[in-house]
Amino acid sequence: MGIVQHSKFHQFKSAIASLEEVNERTLKSQTFLIEKDEKRGIEIYYAPFDYINKHAKVVIVGITPGFYQMKQAYEAVRAASREKSDEEILQDVKKRASLSGPLRKNLTTMLDELHLHKYFKIQSTNELFGEANGLVHTVSVLSYPVFYKGKNYNGTTPDILRTDLLKYYIITQFAQEIMNIEKPLIIPLGINVSRVLFSLAEDGYLDKEHIVSGFPHPSGGNGHRHKQFAQNKEAMKRQLYEHFIK
């Protein structure tokens, strides 16, 4: 466990603590802007998702933190006790903000249907975001919040694998981060994340045998998720069995 190498928390910690309000105006501001591609309409902002659980047994991977998760992360830092270390604060951020909101409920419902919790001898995968947090690492292929024309980026427009700026962050941050975790089960949330992971596997950053294939994005806005999950459910259950038992 620890803080990722590319962490910028020390750079932004005091600015986060001094915020009078936590809203879109204050967070999506020059203070927290990391990079901008005006031609493509891309903006990348800092958010304190800098904690890594190197001992995780399962890694759950999204595209990028959305604004809701970004806001939750900032509020978690502001609510943290001054007596806590940076590592402890960043761990609290991951627990509170990663895959938070309705997304988390949809996700854990599907993971329970795959019986993931049974391999860890817990009642529900919801515990991965509580007492069993030491078993999981949540991360995005784009570690910091990315917005396209002011809205949450979805990996499609512009294409995540054909955009040099985004590929740079995938390789220099996400790929380096996940290589620090020994042989975890990797669950990509949705088609675009799967595309990135299997591309990284082709380039030798990951072992494709550890990547679950066919898991849908759990967003309520993904109207096809139930159908996609039903179609791939038995194959995914076999993948989990082969990973944890064989």
Image: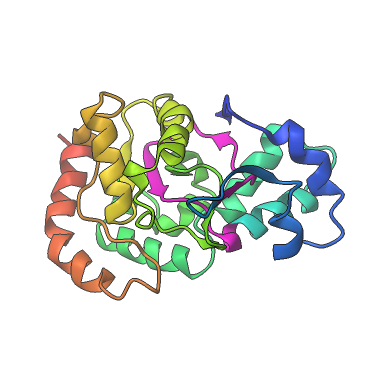
The residue under the point 12% across, 53% down is 235
Give residue 125's quadrant in the image. bottom left
Residue 91 at x, y percent in the picture: 62, 41
Q: Give the range drawn in magenta.
A: 43-69
Q: In this view, does 134 lie to the left or right of 240?
A: right
Give residue 67's quadrant in the image. bottom right
Q: In this view, does 100 lie to the left or right of 113?
A: right
Residue 245 at x, y percent in the picture: 19, 37
The residue under the point 64% across, 46% down is 47
Q: Tell me, yes or no, whether the highlighted magenta stretch contains residue 63.
A: yes
Q: Tell me, yes or no, whether the highlighted magenta stretch contains residue 71.
A: no
Q: Residue 2: tell me if it is visible.
A: yes
User: Which image quarter holds the C terminus?
Assistant: top left
User: Which image quarter holds the N terminus?
Assistant: top right
Q: How many labels does the image show?
A: 0
The residue under the point 20% across, 55% down is 214
Q: Which of 241 and 12 is in front in this view?
A: 12
